[in-house]
Amino acid sequence: MAGLLDHIRRRIQLEGPMSVAEYMHLCLAHPEHGYYRNRDPFGEGGDFITAPEISQMFGELVGLWAVAVWESLGAPNPVQLVELGPGRGTLMSDALRAANQAPAFLDALKVNFIETSPILGETQAAALSEFGPSWHEDLTSLAAGPAIFIANEFFDALPIRQFERSAAGWQERLIGADSNGDLQFQLSPPQHTNPYIPSTLETLPGGAVFEINTAAQGMVGEMTSRIVGEGGAALIIDYGYVEGSNVDTLQAVKEHAYHNVLQAPGDADITAHVDFSAISMAALDGGAQIYGPVGQGNFLRSLGIRERAQQLSANASERQAADIGSALNRLTAPDSMGDLFKVMALTSSGGPMPPGFE
């Protein structure tokens, strides 16, 4: 997108190289040219497919999880059901359809979306009109009271900073431009002390990369404060790692294929793997009880996805049954989404273990 590329070039010319976090933020959230501001990127006709688009089973099981958690909280009325980054509203639609078996839950819930895309907001409004959802740009405007948070593939799109280990020390990876105006990675001067980098990483070899997502840690801290202070729980599902990866996980995707991160900014989705150990620490610091992370495959199997697939297949055509089996495999197989995607739950201290983490 030429408009955003020109804007980034001017910023670099005036202010010097920018951090990876600033670049990600501009590419994804620029008011005019940001990737999520001007398109629907989901599905076969978009750039990527998330779990709710693969099968209704995913959203249904998340809905039943929310019902079980609500009951464990004492069935508060009202309860705020909050989805962060709700896409087309597919997950929430499937979740609330499954929740029909708990009418009291539907009567109690208030649906909330944390969303900044006007285009996706319109799609969500059409999909969930009967529930009268509310939209928010952050958590600060949510109504008071118990809340259940759902975040599926949300944290991977929050901006990260990257630091690379060299013989001279840690250097931040920055985005600059060459003499032709083409964007390029470059390194800051060596930083002999850096508050972001744990001392335990000082022995890493040259070329190791440390990534930090302060936005994700801050968001988890806000959710934790709400859960501990007013009651509730959070379910976080994303691709990532449990211990530091020490490699570059920054990636871009366009039309279901990997794309050069520095080419056509604003025209491709840019993400990074989620550091679950870091967000665990943010939740622990806020006083939350943490469950997981566990693999998505184990989580969904624990909730009964195989049994649900059998139910759906019983009345399906041969082609439909094959599609159901393919979706089941894609969501749960270790060599697909089953291990790469992790699931974590946050609750207030002393509450019962939520489903899926037995």
Image (cartoon, rainbow, N blue to C red):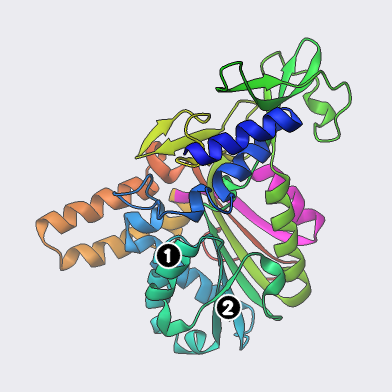
Residue 70: mark:
2
The image shows residue 198 at horizontal and vertical percentages of: 81, 32
Residue pointed to by mark 1:
91
Asked if disc 2 and disc 1 are in contact, CB closer than 8 Å, the reply is: no
- Disc 2: CA contacts within 10 A as few (<14), some (14-19) or many (>=20): many
Q: What element carries label 2?
A: helix
- Position of 181 with respect to 278 (left or right) is left
The answer to whether residue 169 shows anywhere in this view is yes
- Mark 2 or 1: in front is 1
- Residue occupying the far right of the picture: 193
- Position of 103 with respect to 18 (left or right) is left
Instruction: Name the residue located 74 percent from the left edge and 62 percent from the top edge.
Output: 222
**Which is more toward the observer, 73 or 40?**
40
Residue extent of the magenta highlight: 275-296
* Total marks in image: 2
Instruction: Name the residue located 64 percent from the left edge and 45 percent from the top edge.
Output: 276
Specify which label sits upstream in the sequence, 2 or 1. 2
Q: Is mark 1 on a helix, strand or loop?
A: helix
The image shows residue 104 at horizontal and vertical percentages of: 50, 89
Quarter holding the C terminus is bottom right
The answer to whether residue 243 shows anywhere in this view is no
Q: In this view, does 49 lie above or below 243?
A: below
The image shows residue 273 at horizontal and vertical percentages of: 57, 39
Report the amino acid beneath label 2.
Trp
Instruction: Name the residue located 58 percent from the left edge and 78 percent from the top edge.
Output: 70
Q: Quadrant of residue 113?
A: bottom right
